[in-house]
Amino acid sequence: MIRAEQQHDWLKNLLNQAEDDSVKNNSSWLHQTRGDAKHAVMNLPPLNRKQEAWRYNRIDKLFKKNFQLLADNIDFKKPDIYNCLLPNFDSYRLVFVNGCYAGQLSDTKQVPDKVTIESLHNAINLAPKQVSDWFRHSDRENNQLFSMLNTALLNDGAVIHIGDHIELDKPIEIIYLNTNFLNKFNSADNDGIMTQIRNIISLGVAAKVTLIERFIGIDKGQYFHNNFSDIVLAEGALLKHYRVQDESREAYHLSSLQVSQQKNSHYYSTNLAFGGAWSKTNINVDFAEQDAECILNGLYVVGDQQLTDFHLDVRHSVPACTSREQFKGILYGKGRAVFDGHILVEKQAQHSDAQLINNNLLLTRDAEVDTKPQLEIYADDVKCGHGTSVGQIDPEQLFYMRSRGLSETTAYKLLCLGFAGEIIDSIDEKKLSEYVTKKLVQTLDSRNQDGDHIRFLG
Amino acid sequence: MLEIQDLHVAVNGKAILKGIDLKVKSGEVHAIMGPNGSGKSTLAYVLAGREDYQVSSGKILLNGENLLALDTEQRAHKGVFLAMQYPVELPGVNNMMFMRESLNAMRRSRGEEEYDSVDFIKLIRAKAKQLEMDEKLLKRNVNDGFSGGEKKRNEILQMALLEPKLAILDETDSGLDIDALRIIASGVNALRDPQRSIILVTHYQRLLEYIQPDFVHVLMDGRIVRSGDKQLAYELEDKGYRWIVEEIAA
């Protein structure tokens, strides 16, 4: 692990850069909050491998990178966003390019009453008091290095609020386009830009909405996207949350989600990870009241020069809540993945129902996964279970498929798609699941380019 | 026409087939019978091209072409089809999509036009109907959670779809009740064709009452020890395999 002094210098360098741009912030409380976070960051203990979260995930490389903050909203050439949109997909859309809100690419026309879908800075201008309350709330448990950095170096983010009893007519989509401006930001002493996005999402009583987040690396190159979302679901609310991480293969990506659920609320999420040289997603779910339910699904596809890490933490601190976690991994080349699923059932959380499953398919000998399910149970009347597997393609299945005339490549691909199907099917938006399937096929094809295509039944 | 010449095969270093000679002409149905462990399934697998079986010597020619030089899928493209004793489950792989991929792979190899999904659905529905197969099975994943009989029926459906030149049915009758056996047998009989060779690998004579073979061969300890017409099967049913062992010894 990298030395503490080096980490310190790395942080110092970033925070020094941030000194220059703090003036452009017109809101005093935000200025203050960021200032506090800057101080706090420097006082955190350094990361090391003895800390469970970093045991299998080496971040030395990250601390050797010279990231630059985007000091100003540079007027870059408008990226061709239309290549990035799902075809014929209607949504309320927020687009961020390198962490800056791109209003001209967004679409928040006709947002109904009692619904807020805005960039953070716009929201601050529109409702300073409300947003500062939400922001402070989102920062309440912030004691992790990268989430604190997120506050300290904040660029922008999304503020989404759905009023009581509102069922939104179409999904909300947040698209993060990341680009290195044709290597402008990659040079000998500069390894691309680092962006911080903060999302504040709250659903009122019995509100229902689908939220799609897509992280897209438009071109090749390095950058570091550091994303933090605070999600609060009021009583009876339902959030379907789909996240597709498709960063560039050279990118660093960190997502932290903090979910708090009131009585009888439902959080259904599906997380797909395709890109990134290094990517880590932390999902923390807290059941604040009884009868809440969360379903966390995920699929990671990891190849050469990639490390993908999912870290789940579900806390049953009240009775009668249900949690389901199912994550699958497809690894090839020298791909590396870490899956750490922690479920805590506290003593008073009787009648908790928790299940954790992690299955991994290793297509090559050199691929590696560290999977760590942890059930920590202090209540005695609960239903909890976990299962993990790490396997390879069954030669019997390959033979069977080849004996029906399919090439080995096609057979592999169909088996991988079959393996991933369960996760992709948990996406309730047909256009998105089609896109994800296509993405998976492309990824598997790029693994083995022999021009062998498969077509699907419509 | 299939021609097997002095075929020797080992599995994990152990000799299983010890010199098989067999000629199956187009239009003929041959039954290969024999006790457990005699090498029947090995023969079936070797014809289909299983890579973990080592052919130490001998030849397999299909219409004059050396099958042993071809990969599993290339043999399939040449018209070799193996209906397996234990059809493999493919979780997450849709049955209908799998069969369309399969048929189109064959057609591509022959330079023929591929089926689009609409035409394919019509085709497969008609074939399934002939086999009195529940259409729901088409929409499920390949053999996943199918009963023994459903799996066998699915194999014959694939055979009917792919229209092979050489069909090898490995213990297709095992685990079937009498109704299922009758339906599957009529499915196979419908595929009897002057251009097609069929090899039935079976333990019991029962299947042969429904699918009448032109020739019957008895395989014991890796060799064909006796060949005859369907009468041979009745004799075996009467006297058991011991009878041949004793005759050979005598």
Image (cartoon, helix red, strand yellow):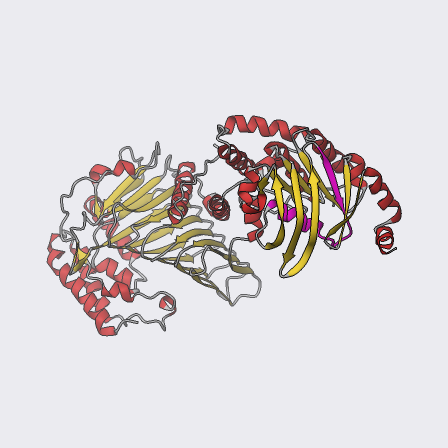
Residue A125: image location, x then y, percent:
18, 45
Residue A337: image location, x then y, percent:
40, 59
Can I make out residue A96 in this image?
yes
Q: Nearer the viewer, residue A279 or B109?
A: B109
Q: Nearer the viewer, residue A412 or A79?
A: A412
Quadrant where the N terminus of chain A sits is: bottom left
Residue A375: image location, x then y, percent:
50, 64
Can I make out residue A208 in this image?
no
Q: What stretch of residues is rendered in magenta?
A: B28-48
- A82 sits left or right of B236 in the view: left
Q: Residue at x 31, y 37 (%)?
A: A85
Residue B244: image location, x then y, percent:
84, 51
- B99 sits left or right of A289 in the view: right
Q: Residue at x 35, y 55 (%)?
A: A257
Q: Nearer the viewer, residue A217 or A271?
A: A217
**A371 relative to A78, above or below:** below
Asked whether B31 falls inside the magenta stretch, the response is yes
Q: Residue at x 15, y 47 (%)?
A: A73
